[in-house]
Image (spheres, rainbow, N blue to C red):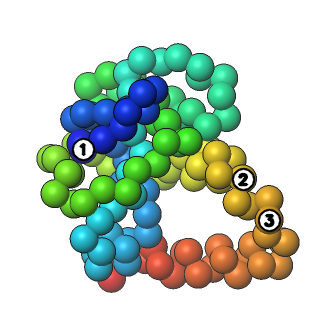
């Protein structure tokens, strides 16, 4: 994926995780992506997720930087590398929720409704 970050943001061609619902993946000309880096710094941060090459098919152990999502055109998506196991996607989802803190504004009942809608939108037809 081509990330267009500046300053301390990730930039250039690098692996990334497509991180949006499958309905959006199919119907939108854009995707939301999370960048990966093989520079394994600040692993203690709750918004960073270590993904091991042995588990994923990546060339190197890498870190998903969940606090730096980027919306990008599908034209900026390169070749498919791998599908991350569900266990990593769960960690990435949690780290992304922590990064935005959006979840802190939702009561428990509403959170269940949002979760149910998200599950529906992520079903592959």
Quadrant holding the N terminus: top left
Which residue is located at x 65 percent, y 73 percent?
115
Q: Give the vertical position of 32 relative to 49 (above or below).
A: below
Q: Which residue is mark 1?
A: 1
Tags 3 and 1 in contact by the CB under 8 Å rule? no
Choose top left, top right, bottom left or bottom right for residue 9.
top left
Which residue is located at x 25 percent, y 33 percent?
12
Q: Secondary structure at mark 1?
A: loop
Tags 2 and 3 in contact by the CB under 8 Å rule? yes
Q: Position of residue 44 (x, y in %)?
A: 66, 23
Q: Secondary structure at mark 2?
A: loop
Task: Give the spatial CA distance, label 3 vs label 1.
Answer: 32 Å
Which disc is residue 105 wearing? 3
> How dense is the environment of label 1, judged by Cα within 10 Å: few (below 14), some, or many (20 and up)?
many
Q: Give the vertical position of 6 relative to 39 (above or below).
A: below
Closer to the chain start, of discs 3 and 1, is: 1
Could one spot residue 101 in this view of the protein? Answer: yes
Task: Give the spatial CA distance, label 2 vs label 3.
Answer: 8 Å
Q: Position of residue 10 (x, y in %)?
A: 38, 32
Q: Position of residue 3 (x, y in %)?
A: 30, 41
Which disc is residue 31 wearing? none
Closer to the chain start, of discs 2 and 1, is: 1
Task: Give the spatial CA distance, label 2 vs label 1.
Answer: 26 Å
Q: Which residue is mark 2?
A: 101
Which residue is located at x 80 percent, y 59 percent?
104
Choose top left, top right, bottom left or bottom right for residue 105.
bottom right
Q: Give the vertical position of 109 relative to 32 (above or below).
A: below
> How dense is the environment of label 3, judged by Cα within 10 Å: few (below 14), some, or many (20 and up)?
few
Q: Secondary structure at mark 3?
A: helix
Q: Is residue 91 left or right of residue 40?
A: right
């Amino acid at each position: 994926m081509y990330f267009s970050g500046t300053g301390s943001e990730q930039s250039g061609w690098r692996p990334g995780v497509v991180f949006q619902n499958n309905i959006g993946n199919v119907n939108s000309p854009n995707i939301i992506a999370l960048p990966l880096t093989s520079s394994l710094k600040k692993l203690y941060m709750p918004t960073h997720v270590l993904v091991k090459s042995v588990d994923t098919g990546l060339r190197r152990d890498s870190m998903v930087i969940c606090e730096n999502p980027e919306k990008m055109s599908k034209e900026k998506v390169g070749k498919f590398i791998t599908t991350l196991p569900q266990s990593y996607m769960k960690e990435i989802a949690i780290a992304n929720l922590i990064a935005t803190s959006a979840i802190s504004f939702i009561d428990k009942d509403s959170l269940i409704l949002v979760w149910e809608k998200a599950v529906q939108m992520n079903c592959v037809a």
